[in-house]
Image (cartoon, grey):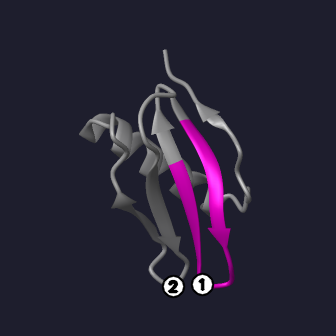
Amino acid sequence: MNKFKLKEFNDEHVVYLYQPEGRGEWGEIIYVFADNEAKIIKRAEEASDWYANKAILKVEQCVRKNNLPIKCIQAWY
């Protein structure tokens, strides 16, 4: 599970905080509209590559579907 919180949103980019399993320090993901992709600015303290990649994909998905700002929990089973 990843938790997300909006940190910054403007015409150039959107920045989200993400936290895997609700533990540790939050990480940051930026989506730059001109680049049309998201990337990690700061990896969350408890994040493996798997959690970080899932968070990136969720942010990209929400931006591309114009579902902003997102405030959600990303769960998988």
From what the image shows, is residue 21 above or below residue 59?
A: above
Residue at the limit of the structure toward the top, as seen here: 77
Residue that appears at 35% across and 45% down: 53
* Rendered location of residue 39, percent (x, y): 38, 63
Q: Is residue 8 magenta?
A: yes
Q: Which residue is mark 1?
A: 12
Residue that appears at 62% across and 33% down: 73
Residue that appears at 43% across and 42% down: 25
Q: Amino acid at mark 2?
A: Ala
Q: Secondary structure at mark 1?
A: loop
* Rendered location of residue 21, percent (x, y): 47, 25
Q: Would you identify the image quadrant in which residue 63 lies?
A: bottom right
Q: Would you identify the image quadrant in which residue 35 lies?
A: bottom left
Q: Which residue is mark 2?
A: 34
From the viewer's perspective, tell me whether residue 64 is left or right of residue 25: right
From what the image shows, is residue 62 above or below residue 53?
A: below
Number of the label disc, if any, that sits on residue 49:
none
**Chain part drawn in magenta:** 3-17
- The residue lying toward the viewer, choosing from 17 and 52, is 17
Query: Which callout, 2 or 1, points at the residue further toward the start of the chain?
Result: 1
The reply to whether callout 2 and callout 1 are in contact (CB within 8 Å) is: yes
* Rendered location of residue 46, percent (x, y): 33, 34
